[in-house]
Image (cartoon, rainbow, N blue to C red):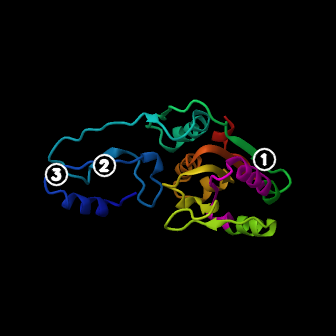
Amino acid sequence: DLSPMELRMLTRRSLNGSMTVVGDIAQSTGAWAHNSWDEILEHLPDRRPPRMAELTVGYRIPAPMMSLAARVLTHAAPGLRPPRSVRQDGQPPLIVRATDGLTDRLIEVIRRELDAVEAGNVAVICPASLVEPVASALDAAGIEYGRATRRGLDAQLTVVPVGLVKGLEVDAAVVVEPGRIISEEAQGMRALYVALTRATRRLSVVHAEPLPAVLQE
């Protein structure tokens, strides 16, 4: 997500031209999102030829959940190969259609996830336009929750705008209206990929609006 100017600032701090850079192009979602490592290398030290090592094994996300995220990855970053998950067991992701309105069905799913993870934590990942409506629904239902902060997640249940969820890890994630995440975010498909890869145990997707085709495949 670094701009060309920021990358050049890093270059000036590498006195011998040697750097180790770790990142995931599929999670490049900011205003300066890059589409390839070649774009980034243009602004980094060139005294030595670059050497790239691709990480192909994932240890955090169960295979059933990674399978769903991998379908989004093919659209978010077509040149990348989805990682192979070591964890072959695990609950398959649950896609829930809210036919009678979003909030009632969402509250039902949230209660179920809180019961399932017991002492674990749950993130409700929303497009920015739905953060306040979701918070109001939780208030009305009498469910305690927190808001994402710079320190991370301080409550068992946290409402997180998708723009802040990168880098976080939770036991269960409830992704709300994936279609709106795609339409609202500058790098919508990548933002959805990030949202789908935050949980280590359970993943639910709740929608009232049409489900993106990539999740219907």
Q: Residue at x 44, y 37 (%)?
A: 80
Q: Residue 154 or 97: which is nearer the viewer?
A: 154
**Mark 1: few/some/many CA within 10 Å (<14, 14-19, 20+):** some
- In the rendered image, which quarter contains the C terminus? top right
**How far is the residue under mark 1 from the one under mark 2?**
40 Å
Mark number for residue 17? 3
Q: Earlier in the sequence, mark 1 or mark 3?
A: 3
Type of the residue with mark 2: Val
Q: Amino acid at mark 3?
A: Gly
Residue designated by label 1: 97
Please tell me how crowded label 3 is: few (under 14), some (14-19), or many (20+) other residues with Cα within 10 Å.
few
Query: Left of 142 or right of it: where is 15?
Result: left
Q: Earlier in the sequence, mark 1 or mark 2?
A: 2
Assign a secondary structure to mark 2: loop
Please tell me whether residue 120 belongs to the stretch shown in magenta: yes
Indicate the amino acid at tag 1. Answer: Arg
**Residue holding disc 2:** 21
Q: Can residue 208 be seen in the rendering of this structure?
A: no
Residue for point 67% across, 36% down:
92
| SS majority, magenta | helix
- The verdict on residue 130 being magenta is yes
As drawn, 54 above or below 122: above
Pick out the residue farthest to the front: 119
CA gap, disc 3 to disc 2?
A: 12 Å
- Circle 2 residues within 10 Å: few <14, some 14–19, many ≥20: few
Q: Nearer the viewer, mark 1 or mark 2?
A: 2
List x then y, in percent, for residue 194.
53, 50
Magenta range: 106-131
Query: Quadrant of the rendered structure where residue 162 is?
Result: bottom right
* Left or right of residue 69, residue 91 in this image: right
| Residue 14 numbered mark, or none | none
102 shown above or below 52: below
